[in-house]
């Protein structure tokens, strides 16, 4: 069934087996323009821009996912099941839950806890732990070490709610050691697990629920560059 309802690509092979997934489609364009060799745009349906190019000679794609679990759930499903994508790497931002997780830090989501009901579709007789691909996680950590980029690896929260009516609910996740909150990784990890493909979520800390510190868009650029240096090596 290609093109799919949300990705306007009629042939397999146009999208690389490895794809970087920022939330913002304009971020996908920025990555294509600044990091990829010979990028070609493959999608503009709903302005969810997607590109395929190369990095150090290796074919790689980048596409926006939109915000939230339903949105990344749709795009990752179509990429995996209809376009044969095997390695899906989310590159995003998150809000810190911990004193020692500072704005501008880079975080890798070893697991993604969630308050979403997304996993109920799999009808499991218990609680599934959405986890990163060990292969991608190990490679990302190795690359970061080689490049001298500090990363923190651990549990993150994929929340369905940005503006929570209970402003203290995050503290319950924090006391379980969850490092930070974003809104997509759990669906990505669940879809990848169900399909037997690889997923990873790399994040920069853009704000802190502990200190209320906030990084401006311009300031984000430096840590963004470091995050991209790690992600691109996974091609
Ligand atoms: N909450 C949810 N998602 C986020 C946040 C946040 O504070 N910061 C960046 N992504």
Image (cartoon, helix red, strand yellow):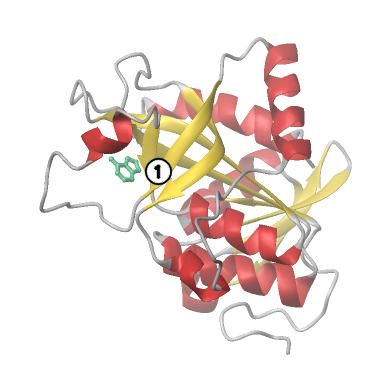
Residue at the spot 45% in from the left edge and 29% down from the top edge: 221
Q: Nearer the viewer, residue 180 or 119?
A: 119
Q: The N terminus is located in which quarter?
A: bottom right
Q: From this viewpoint, is residue 64 visible?
A: no
Q: Residue 79: give x, y in percent of width and height.
A: 68, 69
15 sits left or right of 206 in the view: right
| Image position of 65 with respect to 99: above or below | below
Instruction: Indicate the quadrant where residue 11 lies.
Output: bottom right
Instruction: Please state which of residues 227 and 157 is positioned toward the viewer in this rendering.
Output: 157
Can residue 31 be seen in the rendering of this structure?
yes
90 or 37: nearer the eye? 90
Neighbour tally class for label 1: few under 14, some 14-19, many 20 plus, Cα within 10 Å: many
Find the residue positioned furthest to the bottom.
1
The residue that disc 1 covers is: 157
In the depicted structure, whether residue 37 falls above or below residue 29 = above
The C terminus, quarter of image: top right
Spot occupied by residue 168 in the image (x, y as percentages of width and height): 14, 38
x, y percentage for residue 72?
A: 51, 63
Q: Which residue lies furthest to the top in this view?
A: 148
Q: Position of residue 162 (x, y in %)?
A: 24, 52
On the picture, is 170 further left or further right than 159? left
- The image shows a total of numbered marks equal to 1
Q: What element carries label 1?
A: strand
Residue for point 22% across, 33% down: 171
Q: Which of 95 and 167 is in front in this view?
A: 167
Q: Residue at x 77, y 65 (%)?
A: 15
Q: In this view, does 100 lie above or below 91?
A: above
Residue at position x 63%, y 71% in the image: 77
Q: Is residue 78 above or below residue 225?
A: below
Q: Is mark 1 within 8 Å of ligand 1?
A: no
């Amino acid at each position: 069934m290609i093109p799919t309802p949300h990705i306007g690509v009629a042939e397999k092979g146009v999208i690389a087996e490895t794809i970087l997934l920022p939330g913002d489609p304009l971020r996908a364009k920025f990555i294509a323009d600044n990091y990829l060799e010979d990028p070609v745009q493959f999608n503009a349906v709903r302005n969810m821009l997607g590109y395929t190019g190369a990095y150090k000679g290796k074919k790689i794609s980048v596409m926006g996912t939109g915000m939230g679990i339903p949105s990344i759930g749709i795009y990752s499903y179509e990429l995996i099941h209809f376009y044969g994508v095997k390695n899906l790497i989310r590159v995003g931002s998150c809000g810190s839950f911990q004193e020692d997780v500072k704005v501008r830090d880079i975080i890798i989501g070893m697991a993604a806890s969630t308050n979403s009901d997304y996993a109920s579709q799999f009808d499991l007789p218990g609680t599934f732990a959405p986890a990163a691909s060990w292969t991608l996680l190990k490679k990302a950590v190795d690359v970061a070490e080689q490049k001298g980029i500090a990363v923190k690896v651990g549990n993150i929260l994929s929340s369905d709610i940005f503006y929570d009516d209970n402003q203290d609910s995050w503290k319950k996740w924090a006391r379980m050691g969850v490092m930070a909150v974003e809104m997509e990784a759990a669906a990505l990890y669940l879809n990848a697990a169900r399909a037997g493909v690889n997923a990873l979520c790399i994040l920069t800390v853009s704000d802190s629920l502990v200190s209320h510190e906030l990084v401006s868009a311009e300031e984000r650029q430096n840590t963004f560059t470091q995050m991209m240096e790690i992600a691109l090596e996974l091609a």
